[in-house]
Image (tube, rainbow, N blue to C red):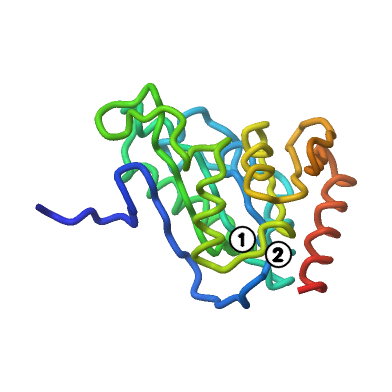
Amino acid sequence: MKPEPYPLQEPGLWVERIDTRIFPTGTPALFLDRDGTINVDTGYPDDPAKMVLRDDIAAAIGAANRAGIPVIIVTNQSGIARGYYGWSDFAAVNGRVLDLLRADKALVDMVLACAYHEAGEGPLAIADHPMRKPNPGMLLEAAKRLGLDLQKSLIVGDKPADMEAGQRAGLSRGWLVDGEAAVQSGFTVRPWRDREDLGGLLAAISALGAAS
């Protein structure tokens, strides 16, 4: 049987180390959802040519790069489970997103993608898989591989599921794109709607770098 050409740990889990930078054990991370957070959401993304970065996201990633904080994408990809596109399409789209970020001097260190979904087909048809957000599996997997301090880490996403995944992974803060502020069981959600909110995120990233 021909080996899978992509970094799949199992049929529905992609784990790819993008950069070779080494981080000290106990370093916090910046976790980011992808579609709707890094790039403009196009529904089920299968066309690299349609990828456009959201305003100011490269600034946040660049701040983490300068602070010595690993940047980790954690993305649900139910379109693969549903048969709308395959891992090859994901690879092409994700490669384009990473290229756009590099052009803005923003580097990603690791990408994790979960394709499991209850509406899927075959081995991907799993309901409430531990790797699928709002479950914390992808964050926990990244923490295990990189030796991260999750409590000090930050997450940015555009859905409540992103915030819940962060909370359940043990993070204390998240930024919700176009969302509302909230505090739940020791987890603080801050909105990211404008440049003032971006300033707060950049300050938090810089503070983590100074502390670590």
Q: How many angstroms separate mark 2 from mark 1 (CA)? A: 7 Å
Given residues 39 and 23, the one toward you in this image is: 23
Considering the image in quadrants, where does the C terminus appear?
Answer: bottom right
Please state if 153 lies on the left or on the right of 180 as rendered.
left
Which three-letter amino acid code belongs to the residue tagged 2? Ala
Which three-letter amino acid code belongs to the residue tagged 1? Val
Q: SS at mark 2? A: helix
The circle on residue 169 is none
Where is mark 1, residue-wise?
Answer: 71
- Rendered location of residue 130, percent (x, y): 47, 40
Tell me which residue sits at (77%, 31%) in the image: 179
Residue 11 sits in which quadrant? Answer: top left
Please state if 195 lies on the left or on the right of 75 as rendered.
right
Where is mark 2, residue-wise?
Answer: 64
Tell me which residue sits at (61%, 74%) in the image: 25
Above or below, 2 against 148 in this view is above
Q: Residues within 10 Å of mark 1 (few under 14, many from 20)?
A: many
Tell me which residue sits at (54%, 64%) in the image: 109
- Rendered location of residue 54, percent (x, y): 67, 43
